[in-house]
Image (cartoon, helix red, strand yellow):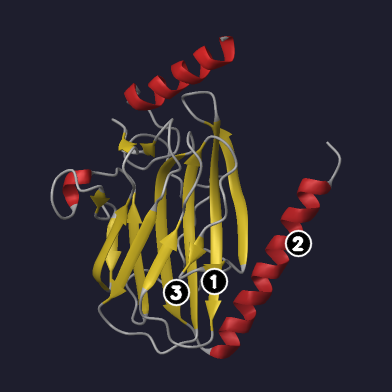
Amino acid sequence: MLSLCRIIISFLLVCLSGQVAADISNGLNPYDPGNGFDTPNEAGWGGWMRGSANTLYAEWDTISDASYGADNDRTAAPDVGTHNVADTYLSWNPGVFVTSTGNLITPSVVQEFFIRISPVSLFSGPLVVALQVEMWGDEPAAPLLNGLAASSWTRTFTGTSVTDHDLNQYLGLWHFVNAVNYFEFDLTNQPFISLAQVAVDIAQIPEPHMLAIMLTGLILIGSMTRYRSSPA
């Protein structure tokens, strides 16, 4: 009974609190030094500027059901920024709702979060796709892109949310040799895992650069594995 009461109280704090520990609009900037998000020009997986030719960018921070399509259709447009985007939205299933801080959460059903993106200018490949996500609560399931698992899925930051639960930021990377011109991310997760912020960066990369990025990703995975397996 005590555990159930703690869960309910924590859930209400997520819904009602006006504070957020890492959202741009409500608290610390996730791109600040020591936090888990990177712009492509700063990241080992990147090497380009947002807004450059042959790139794409979309980011959600404060999620609003009224920002895309009709009110109450459970879709949201990016609120932080976009580039080279013809159409994009974040969607969620019935039973999930938007909190006062612009996060998504539910205590009762499997949470089906999808991001769908169509670019203005088509890519010819090869491509690197980076997905940066902030979630509160338990360890989330790894996302899929067009039904494919990420080449790497790494936790880049761990903190504490206002509900005294884990606040985690993650980086997922995909590498495509051939052209891809429609992107559907599947971030389906169990209840009580709150989706707080999402950034998508895509770039068409020359093949030598692609090899360097893939090598950087492998080094990153190896370093995180060693870190997690080292004794406290």
Give how far apart the Cα atoms at labels 2 and 3 are: 24 Å
- Residue nearest the viewer, comparing 64 with 95: 95
Q: Which residue is mark 3?
A: 48
Q: Residues within 10 Å of mark 1 (few under 14, many from 20)?
A: many
The numbered disc on residue 174 is: 1
Q: Is residue 172 above or below residue 52?
A: above
Name the quadrant of the C terminus: top right
Q: Position of residue 129 (x, y in %)?
A: 48, 71
Q: Position of residue 88 (x, y in %)?
A: 27, 64
Callout 2: helix, strand or loop? Answer: helix
View extreme (left): residue: 70
Q: Position of residue 156 (x, y in %)?
A: 59, 50
Choose top left, top right, bottom left or bottom right for residue 39: bottom left
View extreme (top): residue: 2
**Disc 2 residue type (three-letter):** Gly
Give how far apart the Cα atoms at labels 3 and 1 are: 16 Å
Position of 231 with respect to 207 (left or right) is: right
- Foreground mark, 2 or 1? 1
Disc 3 vs disc 1: Cβ atoms closer than 8 Å? no
Q: Is residue 161 above or below residue 183?
A: above
The numbered disc on residue 222 is: 2
Choose top left, top right, bottom left or bottom right for residue 150: bottom right
**Disc 1 residue type (three-letter):** Trp
Identify the residue at image location x=39%, y=20%.
12
